[in-house]
Image (cartoon, grey):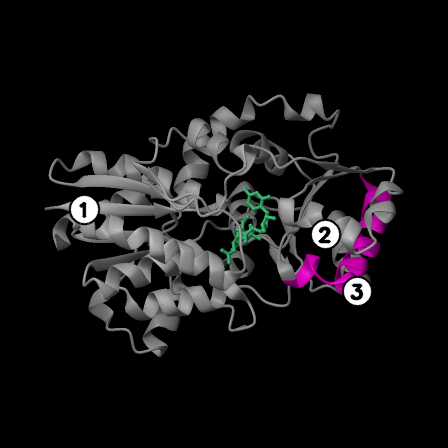
């Protein structure tokens, strides 16, 4: 069994890579290396997650930083190729659907190195979404595809991926949630923000389709204005969104919302606590749709589709789109409704990374 190079780059990758790095320890023959592409580089978008989740220091940081999709993807490829040539790994493991995922996957396969994709098979069927292209292309070239929910099996079959490459292992992001929930409950973030359990909403928005367009973001702001009149609302804001507010002429609009508080992006533990005690989460994140499903918190997804349908069929998620009236109506409905514990999606049991490490060890 040889070297496995594991890739992480952007915030949602860190909670996926953490349980994998731990699970490899059960296999003496596996020699895991960790490469950070540097796609995310702010301390509260990256370093804090390494500390809180006990992720080993990356063996290498490619320090690519921000750029257009083409520039960022190309830069990651240029800097990752010599790493693969030097280390000659048996496997490259990529997670999720960010630019680092496809960039490193492509480099590996062009050098004839085996590629494994964690969180394979998810499809929004919306090819205007950059992550959908990253998902489709990474799955098309992967040798092992680790699927998190049943829809992934169906999608990969439909795309003609041979069954023997595909394994339904569960959800590594939920491994991390389960491992850290108790610790997160000790976070003092509610005191810091002067919030009461269940007495507030939490918002996150960062998708270009929502926050790069004045009309769309203006509509969402209208909905948030109504929502914050009902309950205090906290909005840990992604750097892209912070950057866009003044550019789109929306800064003043947000300042006028007396019960809506914009704060810096939070670390993993504080955010987990904030989310777990919220009344409603309003988001365009993929991960939060899954996490609220396990936490038993209502989630309104401000998008027209989701690549994670199990969060709707067995979870707490509702797709509400970006129309303000629809968002407000869905919010009112959820606030009035008691939430009974939803069924836990199959294999979201905290052991997905163990299954992946075992399969990789067997395939080596
Ligand atoms: C990326 C992922 C997205 C994921 C999100 C989580 C892709 C295509 N998108 O989007 O799937 O949901 O991460 O956050 O890979 N910036 C900083 N500091 C940082 C990182 C980014 O200020 O540490 C700012 C920069 O202005 C940058 C912008 O955020 O241009 C966008 O960053 P980028 O990595 O391009 O994509 P995200 O929007 O974060």
At 15% from the left and 47% from the top, the residue drawn is 361
Q: Quickly name the residue at label 2.
A: 244
Splitting the image into 4 quarters, where does residue 302 fall? bottom right
Does 251 sit above or below residue 207? above
Which SS type dominates the magenta stretch? helix
Q: Earlier in the sequence, mark 3 or mark 1?
A: 1
Using a 10 Å C-alpha cutoff, classify the residue at mark 2 as few (fewer than 14 neighbours), some (14 to 19) or many (20 or more).
some
Residue 92 point in image, percent of width and height = 25, 53
Q: Quickly name the residue at label 3.
A: 215
Distance of mark 2 from mark 1, alpha carbons?
Answer: 40 Å
Using a 10 Å C-alpha cutoff, classify the residue at mark 3 as few (fewer than 14 neighbours), some (14 to 19) or many (20 or more).
few
Q: Quickly name the residue at label 1.
A: 87
Residue 74 point in image, percent of width and height = 41, 60
> Is 265 in the magenta?
no
Query: Which stretch is magenta?
Result: 209-231
Using a 10 Å C-alpha cutoff, classify the residue at mark 1 as few (fewer than 14 neighbours), some (14 to 19) or many (20 or more).
few
Q: Closer to us: mark 3 or mark 1? A: 1
Q: Earlier in the sequence, mark 2 or mark 3?
A: 3
Work out whether residue 278 can be spotted.
yes
Badge 3 element: helix
Badge 2 element: helix
Splitting the image into 4 quarters, where does residue 54 fall? top left
Does 30 sit above or below residue 107? above
Task: Between residue 66 and residue 154, name the one nearer to us.
Answer: 66
Task: Between residue 61 and residue 167, name the one nearer to us.
Answer: 61
Pointers 3 and 1 in contact (CB under 8 A)? no
């Amino acid at each position: 069994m040889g070297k496995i190079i594991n890739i992480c780059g952007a915030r949602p990758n860190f909670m996926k890579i953490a349980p994998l790095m731990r699970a490899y320890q059960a296999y003496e023959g596996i020699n895991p290396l960790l490469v950070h592409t540097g796609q995310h580089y702010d301390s509260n978008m990256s370093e804090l997650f390494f500390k809180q989740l006990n992720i080993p220091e990356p063996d290498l940081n490619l320090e690519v930083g921000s750029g257009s999709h083409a520039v960022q993807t190309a830069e990651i490829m240029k800097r990752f190729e010599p790493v693969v040539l030097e280390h000659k790994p048996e496997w490259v493991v990529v997670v999720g659907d960010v630019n680092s995922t496809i960039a490193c996957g492509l480099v590996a396969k062009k050098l004839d190195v085996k590629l494994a994709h964690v969180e394979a098979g998810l499809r929004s069927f919306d090819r205007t979404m950059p992550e959908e292209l990253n998902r489709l292309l990474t799955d098309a070239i992967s040798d092992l595809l680790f699927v998190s929910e049943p829809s992934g099996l169906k999608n990969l079959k439909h795309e003609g991926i041979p069954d023997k490459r595909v394994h339904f292992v569960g959800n590594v992001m939920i491994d991390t949630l389960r491992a850290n929930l108790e610790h997160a409950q000790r976070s003092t973030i509610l005191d810091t923000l002067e919030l009461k359990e269940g007495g507030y909403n939490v918002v996150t928005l960062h998708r270009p389709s929502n926050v790069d367009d004045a009309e769309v973001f203006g509509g969402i702001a209208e909905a948030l204005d109504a929502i914050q009149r009902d309950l205090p609302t906290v909005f840990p804001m992604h750097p892209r969104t912070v950057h866009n507010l003044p550019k789109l002429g929306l800064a003043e609009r947000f300042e006028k919302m007396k019960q809506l508080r914009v704060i810096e992006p939070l670390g993993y533990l504080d955010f987990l606590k904030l989310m777990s005690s919220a009344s409603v989460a309003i988001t365009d994140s993929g991960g939060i749709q899954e996490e609220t499903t396990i936490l038993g918190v209502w989630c309104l997804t401000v998008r027209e589709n989701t690549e994670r349908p199990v969060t709707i069929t067995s979870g707490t998620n509702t797709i509400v789109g970006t129309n303000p009236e629809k968002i407000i109506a869905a919010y009112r409905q959820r606030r009035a409704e008691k939430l009974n514990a939803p069924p836990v999606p199959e294999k979201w049991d905290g052991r997905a990374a163990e299954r992946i490490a075992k399969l990789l060890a067997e395939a080596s």
